Image (cartoon, grey):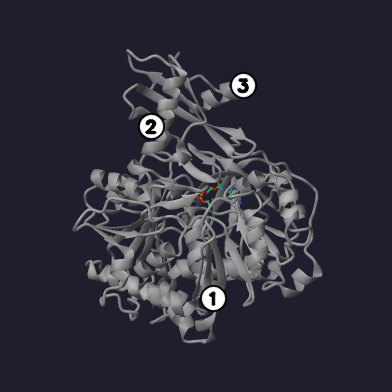
Amino acid sequence: MAEAVATTNTQEWYYPSEEIVKNAYIPDYDAVYKKAQQDPEAFWAEQAEKLHWFRKWDKVLDSSNAPFYKWFVGGKTNIAYNALDRHVKTAHKNKLALIWEGENGDQHTYSYYRLTQEVNKFANVLKSMGVQKGDRVTIYMGRVPELVIAMLACAKIGAVHSVVYGGFSEQSLADRIEDAQSRVLVTQDGAWLRGQIVELKKIADAAVRRSPVVEHVVVFKRTGHAVEMEPDRDYWWHDLMALPIASTKCEAEVMDAEDPLFILYTSGTTGKPKGILHTHGGYQVYTSTTLQWVFDLKEEDRWWCAADPGWITGHSYIVYAPLILGVTSFMYEGAPTHPYPNRWWKLVEYYGITVMYTAPTAIRGLMRFGAAWPNRHDLSSLRLLGSVGEPINPEAWKWYYEVIGKGRCPIMDTWWQTETGGFMITPLPVTPLKPGSATKPFPGIEVDVVDEDGHPVPPGQDGLLVIKKPWPGMLRTVYGDPERYKNQYWSKFPGMYLAGDSARKDEDGYIWVIGRVDDVIKVSGYRLGTAEVESGLVSHPAVAEAAAIGLPDELKGNIIYAYCLLRQGYEGSPQLEEQLKDHVRHEIGPIAVPAKIEFVKQLPKTRSGKIMRRVLKARALGQPEGDISTLEE
Ligand code: PRX
């Protein structure tokens, strides 16, 4: 079922300029793809050789316990060493690693040297709190450099970070702390967004009350507004960083290639979030190779991935891959429209951004304000553009291409997931483009579109997107739930990874991703489970049962539409609708708030009691209800 903005096949081709082709890191996609296909292990080993290993691996891939694949078996490494220490030994020491601008105009820059020192200091702070290799640390922050520092500090000492996006509220944060059993939480007083303060510390306090496993809370001061600090539990970041314990020296922990690096929770089909687990070895190889080849990053580039570090896009392409490649990365704290809708374009001009990577929802959002805003700025520094998170509708693609890229900058529409670690289906700069298609698989990746029996479908037909071989950046498991990992991704078609998306391949072998086939809704590119929204609703005393569906929306891709069956004694009213929305905002977060809540007397269910969301959706869209033979009514 198409979930997001419909994409349509188009025969319009867009070709890269001679300049782009001349500078391409991979000038001949077909040749490299074929080489990787012939011997994937040799191919990945060749990429891995580019990084530092304390001890080289004995075996590239171990499939003996599939689907629990292992990469670079026996190899010893540390991703933070590759991202920082390695560069400090070269002229990169003096190069800018990170340029940051706050929403209020604050500016900070970090050379590789400075960043390494800050990371080492915070690593020592964590150690002093008793954090050891393998311990989980939850990080709940806004888009500030200290978030990057905290992540890298964990990696450096072998602790496992679990970053929770700042747009989640107390119950979501508490669930994630609880699942990871984090004894340390890193947060900040507040984050700036649209000129307002997001009360991160207050939410963190409420979450810790629900999940008392946390022993220490480190609070970075960003907004400076008054927050409560609990004695013997809460410490200011700047106080800790000023202690003698916060030395600038910290050796990287020698990690096994398969040791966990981070957990990142993402929505699935049940109310319980899945902790996607990534490791040091394969992830560093996969993210750095994909970034270098897809965005052709060079020494002189200024790369801007406008995602939030709290999502996989930020983990892979703000934090780890750019630093491993020794690139200069730009990060902006706030909203694209603050104080005016030209903020992003002003930043591109001011900082001379050369490659920019964002999401279709952001493009559509800015498109609404018209071309006059970007046209006020000199965007000639841009060389390449990127898109991620949901299908990009051709209209937004063309606006991005013409108005932002001035027809010079190819758009890399990258399809991937939290689970995949990095880009999977994506153009390279030399790839001829069709607006709306993510084009072809990255070298070393084999994908297909199959029917319910796992057989490839003919070109032009919708089917399920699968990945036919393991790859180094793949998730290793669902944290604490290996069965779920096996069932969710590898059981429908043995030997093939089920992505959960529907797609079609066209006559040219180009892949068109249509959207999710499960109960996952993409709202403004954010991934939410219907079950999460529903459990948020039923936790309100008025609600007996709830069902949530995604409906197409021009701006957000999808919006959440919810149906609520009330308990006896409650009447549906606009006031109650507002109360319920507030409740969801408070419990789960603003991103999960339904656009509309409808009060109903009955929900369509199967005889076994499962809500038929498919039927609700068809009704809402005025479409045929399909097979309703299992409907109870
Ligand atoms: O449905 C696909 C959509 O986003 C899902 C993965 O979401 P998440 O794990 O949050 O990761 C998003 C950032 C990598 C996919 O299953 N998706 C992601 N990129 C694209 C996309 N759909 C179409 N085109 C894309 N480029």
Residue 333 in percent (x, y) is at 51, 57
- Residue at horizontal 52%, vertical 56%? 104
- Horizontal side of residue 520 vs 380, given as left or right: left
Q: Which residue is mark 2?
A: 583
Q: Of label 2 and label 3, which has the lower sequence position?
A: 2
As displayed, is residue 554 above or below residue 353? Answer: above
**Type of amino acid under label 2:** His
In this view, 173 is above or below 55: above
Residue 626 seen in the current view: no
Residue ID for mark 1: 96
Residue 228 or residue 621, whichever sits in front = 228
Who's the residue at 50% across and 79% down the image?
49
Amino acid marked by disc 3: Pro
Tag 1: Cα neighbours inside 10 Å, few (<14), some, or many (≥20)? many
Disc 2 crowd rating (10 Å Cα; few below 14, some 14-19, many 20+) is: some
Disc 2 element: helix
Dots 1, 2 in contact, CB < 8 A: no
Quadrant showing the N terminus:
top right
Q: Is residue 340 above or below residue 232?
A: above
Q: Quadrant of residue 280?
A: bottom left
Task: Return the mark for residue 624.
Answer: 3
SS for callout 1: strand
Gap in angstroms between the C-alphas marked 1 and 2: 43 Å
